[in-house]
Structure formats: C-alpha cells, structure tokens
Image (spheres, rainbow, N blue to C red):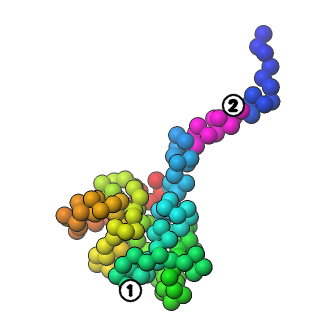
Amino acid sequence: MAKPVSRRTALTVLGAGVLGAAFLTGRWTSPARGSEIYTDLVRGVGAGGHDVVAYFTAGRPVPGSSRITHAWNGAVWRFASVANRDAFAAAPERYAPSYGGHCSWAAAQGYKAKGDPQNWKIVGGRLFLNYNADVQKTWETNIPGFIASADGNWPGLRQR
C-alpha cells in the first residue's frame, strides 16, 4: 500500500515543477521573452534606459531620467528632457529602435538577442541596435542586406 504524501511534500514537488518549467521555458532567465521590446538591460525599460530621441537629435546615446518617462508598447521609455519625451509620445514608431531594440544582426539571422544601446546606427531614419561592437562591425559589412533579412524575419520573431 502506498504511503500518503504529506501536504508539505506535495507543495515542495509542485513548487519544484513550476520553477523547473519556468527555467526550461526561459521565463526564469529572461523576463522579457515573448516581448516585442527588449527590456532585460533595465527591467521593464526600453533601450536600456537611454533616450531614444537623443540618438536622432544629439547623435549619441544619452541616458534618460527615471523621472521623465513614457509608457509605450509594453515598456517604459526614459528621456533626458520633457521635449524628447513629448516628441516620442507624438510619434513613437519614428524613434523606437527597430526590432524592439533587439540586435539587428541577430534578427537578420532569424533569432532574438539583446541590443546594446552603445552599439547603434541610424540608417534610413531608423535606429538599429546590435549585440556588441564586433557584431556591429559584421552588420556594417552588409547593412542593406541584413536590414532586408531582419525586416523579413521580424514578424515571426516578434512574440517569440
């Protein structure tokens, strides 16, 4: 005859199963998995907290303020000025990084990887981020081709 399982044992087994499933599905290691916007650098914040409008106006990455924000597309976006926040709020698609801030080269290869706000380029009026400086150098060898591939892949990658 089987020995009855205590409530404590049952809860321990259940908890281990939930944690195991979370780990195996990536929910434990990557809270933003399945999100269009990459927010792992600063949890819940787009572009690692950098002011995405500043890439266009200042021509460089500028940290945003946690006091000047705008919520859009499942993420909080930070800005260095109220004017930049208002410009973003009026036209977020114009300023938000392509592929939700995920690495542009990775998107061209058919997968998602983190985008680093320090490795960026504006091409054709669009902001692109890449994983690191080495990946960006590779991306720069065929920018038009990689953009075309990433644009084709992105619809299928958006919610993965």
Q: Residue 106 sits in which quadrant?
A: bottom left
Secondary structure at badge 1 equals helix
Q: Residue furthest left?
A: 141
Task: Report the residue marked by disc 2.
Answer: 13
> Vertically, is 145 above or below 59?
above
Residue in the image at 29% along x and 62% along y: 133
Using the rendered image of the protein, determine whether residue 71 is visible from the camera's viewpoint.
Answer: yes
Foreground: 140 or 65?
65
Q: Which stretch appears magenta?
A: 12-22
**Magenta stretch: helix, strand or loop mostly:** helix
Question: The disc labelled 1 sits on which kind of residue?
Answer: Thr
Q: Quadrant location of residue 99?
A: bottom left
The disc, 1 or 2, on the residue closer to the chain's N-terminal end is: 2
Position of residue 135 relative to residue 47, above or below, is: above
- 66 sits left or right of 121 in the view: right
Q: Nearer the viewer, mark 1 or mark 2?
A: 1
Seen at 33% across and 53% down, the residue is 110
Q: Position of residue 50 (x, y in %)?
A: 46, 73
Look at label 2 and name its amino acid.
Val
- Find residue 72 and report its horizontal and vertical position in percent: 54, 73
Q: Which mark is residue 48?
A: none
Q: How many marks?
A: 2
Q: Alpha-carbon distance for marks 1 and 2?
A: 54 Å
Which is more toward the observer, 60 or 155? 60
Q: Which residue is mark 1?
A: 57
Is residue 45 inside the magenta stretch? no
Q: Residues within 10 Å of mark 2 (few under 14, many from 20)?
A: few
Q: Categorize mark 1 by other alpha carbons within 10 Å: few (<14), some (14-19), many (20+).
A: few
